[in-house]
Image (cartoon, grey):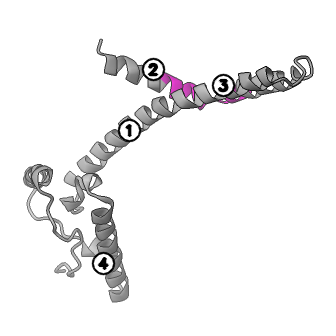
Amino acid sequence: MKLVQIFGRAADRVAKAAGHPATFMACCAVVLIWAASGPFFGFSDTWQLIINTSTTIVTFLMVFLIQNTQNRDTAALQAKLDELLLTSAAQDSFIGIEHLSEEEVQKFRDECAAAAEKVMKAGERPAENRDSGGGNGKKRAKAASRRLSAKATGLRKKSPVAVDKAPA
């Protein structure tokens, strides 16, 4: 088994356990026990150092484990969304925009907002305004796949939203 697989499984288990109510209650119990033991240790520097060091170590390790889990969840979600875009009448020019810079993504959002405003002013429903992409799903999937490959080498600068009214 690869180290990446072992780490992934451990990260999943830790993230799941960390979000469980029993884990929260156990952490609260540890803090209460530590606080109650203060008078016994005279509220010494060592007594304070124990809780500070423990929480710092746990927090440090949890950041990496939870980030790994979130990265994998986000990648899986993006793959699912890309598949939905490929198999629907939605515009597949949105596929892969998660790889763009923050500024490029903001341009997409601004264009979408402008298109939505134009559609609402015209009194249309957004679904009536969609570009169906023409052709069947397999043709659209192949075209989207080619565009996704093109994005990897040089990202396309095409407007993501069709604002022209579709023929009735």
> Label 3 sits on what residue type?
Thr
Q: CA distance from mark 1 to mark 4?
A: 31 Å
For the C terminus, the image quarter is bottom left
Q: CA distance from mark 2 to mark 4?
A: 45 Å
Q: Residue furthest bottom?
A: 122
Q: Which residues are magenta?
A: 13-25
The circle on residue 53 is: 3
Residue that badge 1 annotates: 71
Q: Name the mark nearer the viewer: 3 or 2.
A: 3
Closer to us: 31 or 6 = 31
Q: Position of residue 104 (x, y in %)?
A: 27, 64
Q: CA distance from mark 4 to mark 3?
A: 53 Å
For the N terminus, the image quarter is top left
Q: Secondary structure at mark 2?
A: helix
Residue that badge 2 annotates: 10
Q: Secondary structure at mark 4?
A: helix
**Lower sequence index among marks 1 and 3:** 3
Which residue is drawn at the image coordinates 29% and 15% (left, top)? Answer: 2
Which residue is drawn at the image coordinates 19% and 70% (left, top)? Answer: 131
